[in-house]
Image (spheres, helix red, strand yellow):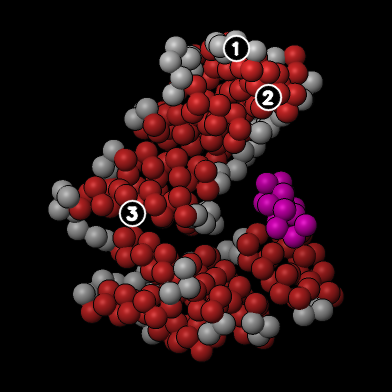
Amino acid sequence: MMLGRCRQPEQASLLFEMMRCDGLKPTIDVYTGLVSAYGQSGRFQEAFSIIDEMKSVCDCKPDVYTYSVLLNSCTKVHRSFNTIVDGYGKAGMFAEMENSLAEMLENGCSVPDVFTLNSVVGAYGGSGQIEKMQEKYDEFQLMGINPDIKTFNILIRSYGKAGKRFFSPTIVTHNVILETYGKGGYIYEMDQYFKNMKHQGVKPNSITYCSLVSAYSKAGDMMKVDSILRQVENSDVLLDTPFFNSVISAYGRAGELDKMEELFSAMEEKNCKADYITYATMIQAYNDQGMTKAAENLEKKMLAARKSSGIWLYLLHSCLH
C-alpha cells in the first residue's frame, strides 16, 4: 500500500513475487494492496488483471473493499463514470446505468468514449434487448464515437443469440456487417452485401453511406465516393453531420480541397451543424497540402463561433495537437 502511494507499482509487484517465493500465501488484503498500487498509478490494465487473478484463487475472491479501492483510483483519474456505467450494466441495473450516462453527458467533465459504448451496448445486447442495443449503438455513432473490434464482437454475439429467438435483422444489423467488411478492407464483399441488402428492400440510411464512404476512401477509390454522393443526392436519405464529416474527410485525404470546400458549403445550406470533427478534418487537410494560411483562417473562424464551449474546444485541441 505504501509503495502504491509512492507511485512505485513495479516495486510493489516485485515485493508480491518475493512473498510468494518465500512461501507466503497472499491474502485478499495483499492482493487488494497490489490492485491499489497499480490503480493509483493509473495502470488499470494491470489492476483489472489482478482482479481477474483473484477470482481464480481460492479464498481470495475480490470483496467490497477491493472494488472500493479500484473505484477510488478510477475516480482520481476521471474514469469513474465509465467504471460505474460498466458496473451497472453488468448487474442488469439499466435505469441506474442510463442515469449515470445522462449525468456523464450533462456535467461535461467526462466525455463518453468507446469503453462507454461497449459497456452500454454490451449490457443491452447481453440481456437480449436487441432494439435497445441498436438504438444506443446509433446514438454513440451520432456522437462521433467509433466502434472497435470489441464492439463488433459484442454486436455479432448479441445478434447470434437473438437469431436463435427468430430475430429479424434491421438496418443496424446490415450497417454493422458493412462496416466490418469496410474496416477489414474487404471492398468486393462489402459491395456485394450492399447490393443484396438493397435487393431485399432494405433502405440505406446515413450511417450506411458513412461506412461505404469511409471504406472507399481508405482504399483510395474516389470514383466510388463520387458514386455514393450521386446516389445520396438522388435519394430521400436525411443527411446529417456524420455523413458530411465522412465525405469531407474522404476528399480532404485525397487532396481534393475544392470538393471538400463545396461539401462544407452544402453542409451549411442544409443546416447541418459543423462540429469539432468537421473543423479538425479540414484544418488537417489544409496543413497536409501546405495551406497553413487557410488552416489558420478556418481555426480562427471556428474559435470565434465556439468560444463558449470549453469541452468542444478541448476535443478540437486534442485532435489537432
Q: Position of residue 71 (x, y in %)?
A: 57, 23
* Residue extent of the magenta highlight: 307-321
Q: Is residue 6 visible?
A: yes
| Residue holding disc 1 | 23
* Residue 295 against residue 305 in the figure, above or below: below
- The residue carrying pointer 3 sits among few (fewer than 14), some (14 to 19) or many (20 or more) residues within 10 Å by Cα, namely some
| Residue holding disc 3 | 156
| 320 in magenta | yes
Give the CA separation, mark 3 to mark 1: 46 Å
User: Who's the residue at 75% across and 24% down the image?
Assistant: 11
Q: Residue furthest front?
A: 22
Q: Earlier in the sequence, mark 3 or mark 1?
A: 1
Marks 1 and 2: CB-CB under 8 Å? no
Secondary structure at numbered mark 3: helix
Q: Position of residue 283 (x, y in %)?
A: 73, 69
Q: Residue 177 falls in which quadrant of the image?
A: bottom left
Q: Nearer the viewer, mark 1 or mark 2?
A: 1
Q: Quadrant of the N terminus?
A: top right
User: Who's the residue at 71% across and 46% down the image?
Assistant: 310
- The residue carrying pointer 1 sits among few (fewer than 14), some (14 to 19) or many (20 or more) residues within 10 Å by Cα, namely few
The amino acid pointed to by label 1 is Gly
The amino acid pointed to by label 3 is Ile
The amino acid pointed to by label 2 is Ser
Q: Position of residue 145 (x, y in %)?
A: 53, 54
* Residue 310 against residue 57 in the figure, above or below: below
User: Who's the residue at 49% across and 37% down the image?
Assistant: 101
Give the CA separation, mark 3 to mark 2: 38 Å
| 72 in magenta | no
| Residue holding disc 2 | 13
Predominant SS along the magenta part: helix
